[in-house]
Image: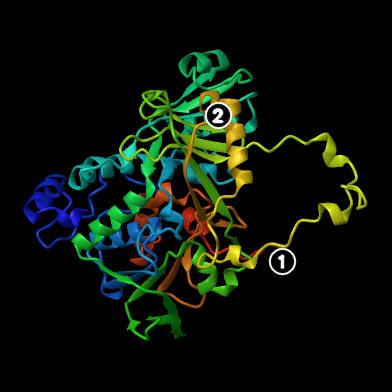
Amino acid sequence: MVDDLPRRDFLRVAGSAGLLLAGGCAPPIAFANAPAKGIERGRGATSSSSHVVVIGAGAWGGWTAYHLRSRGVQVTLIDAYGPGNSRSTSGDETRGIRSSYGDRAVGELWTPWARTAIQRWNLFEQEWGPVFRTKFFHQTGDVIMRPTREPFITKTIDLWTANKVPHEVLSGDEARKRWPVIKADDITVAITEPDAGVVRCRAATQAVAAIGQKMGVKLVIGRVKPGDIRNNMMDGVTLEDGTVIRGDSYVFACGPWLRKLFPYLENRMRVPIGHALYFGVPVADSRFSFPNLPSYNFPGVTGWPMLPVDSRGFRVRGAIAAPASASASAAPAGGAPANSPAATATPPADPAQQDPDLSSRWTNQDRVDGARRFLAARFPLLANAPLLETRACHYESSINGNFIIDNVPGTTNAWIAGVGQAEGFKFGPVVGDYVAQRVLGINGDPELVKAFKLPTTEYTPG
């Protein structure tokens, strides 16, 4: 970790990149070569926001603390379990970094930020990889393959063209020739984003928190309860041992825990669990490892090659469902017909699986089998690959399909920043900058202010 480096080495490497000032605070020009739409640079702390308490040290909270500190703000960062812990949304080993959002109603809003995020992850890698003596961002490129030129493909190409994103459009024959290890007999179109990539998620989350501490951020491990609201101002947060931590402003970047802290979010966001599986690649066969294969996207399934820096494995998220069998429609002996309510009723959901403190993250055999069906269909050489490990985490979705970056209702000094729609990690370097700006009283682009407001509509209960 960064604290293990001799101070002179840390300052030499980081200082040469222009990251540290003599007082240990990063200047606000750290990402000057990757400006973000709607975010102003060069404006720092004000007297009304000289100390900000950030709750949640995941991707958004960690980057928010970093950007606030870089603007000269005193920051206390609090997390219940610590940065990159196994319960957190940022606790998986890897995350894809891309800008293909033709399937999202908010694609026009997200695409420019996603492109900036790619640039900033590259800068982060260049500046901090040497400090930690490791590699965080891997520019794998990304390929999306489809049997037909569906609307997702068409809209993504339109968004890329409008934003001047380097990309390719390949025929099925070209895709098969370029990546012969992929079984793509039915594919007629493939689109690529050559500078997309994959970040080592857990490692990067912990690195950002460590960098923040070097800059002067105070990290506290503990669970908080929001303070009372008086005259539109939140008055502190309370730890489990009764300690009250007060600041001028508060940012709750707690991912799936937001619903537990603010019950009125219960029917405005969902916290499903996603599962990722990591399979071992063949010994002495580099075709399934970075940099010889891009990250990939097929209907319902995404993944990427093994990253040799830590060799977690070949990643698969998603599955191919089991084929319907002839016996499935037959009536069981002495029982109700298979298509009757008694036979087809879904077991009630386990309430514990909606609670990030209590939910089990075990990946069951059905998911493993579904992932293997995908491998057999698209990467047949990996059909019998050993399963090395699985990861599971809650992600958050909101009824309007967009992020929430808005004041806690009834306050002017407390903020909710979350609901990443299963895409939030990649946006961390940009979202943290934007949240810092809003906390400092800079609204910026009114379109973004409106887009990220707390939803007023709710999901139908149940």
- What amino acid type should be assigned to the residue bearing mark 2? Ala
Taking the view exactly as shown, the residue that stands out farthest to the left is: 8
In this picture, is 243 found above or below 334? below
Viewer can see residue 71:
no
Quadrant of the rendered structure where residue 136 is?
top left
Viewer can see residue 382:
yes
Q: How is the image coloured?
A: rainbow
Point out residue 157 in the picture as x, y percentages from the top left corner: 53, 29
Q: Secondary structure at mark 1?
A: loop
Nearer-the-camera pick, 113 or 221: 221
Quadrant of the rendered structure where residue 185 is?
top right
In this picture, is 416 found above or below 366? below
Q: How many marks?
A: 2
Task: Looking at the image, tell me whether mark 1 or mark 2 is earlier in sequence order.
Answer: 2
Q: Secondary structure at mark 2?
A: loop
Q: CA distance from mark 1 to mark 2?
A: 41 Å
- Image quadrant in which the C terminus is located: bottom right
Nearer to us of marks 1 and 2 is 2
Taking the view exactly as shown, the residue that stands out farthest to the front is: 333
Point out residue 294 in the picture as x, y percentages from the top left corner: 43, 28
Q: Is residue 447 left or right of residue 74?
A: right
Point out residue 57 in the picture as x, y percentages from the top left corner: 36, 62
Say which mark, if any, is on residue 383. 2
Quadrant of the rendered structure where residue 122 is?
top left
- What amino acid type should be assigned to the residue bearing mark 1? Pro
Q: Is residue 216 left or right of residue 157?
A: left
Say which mark, if any, is on residue 461. 1
In this picture, is 380 found above or below 3? above
In this picture, is 138 found above or below 233? above
Mark 2 Cα-neighbour bin, 10 Å: few <14, some 14–19, many ≥20? some
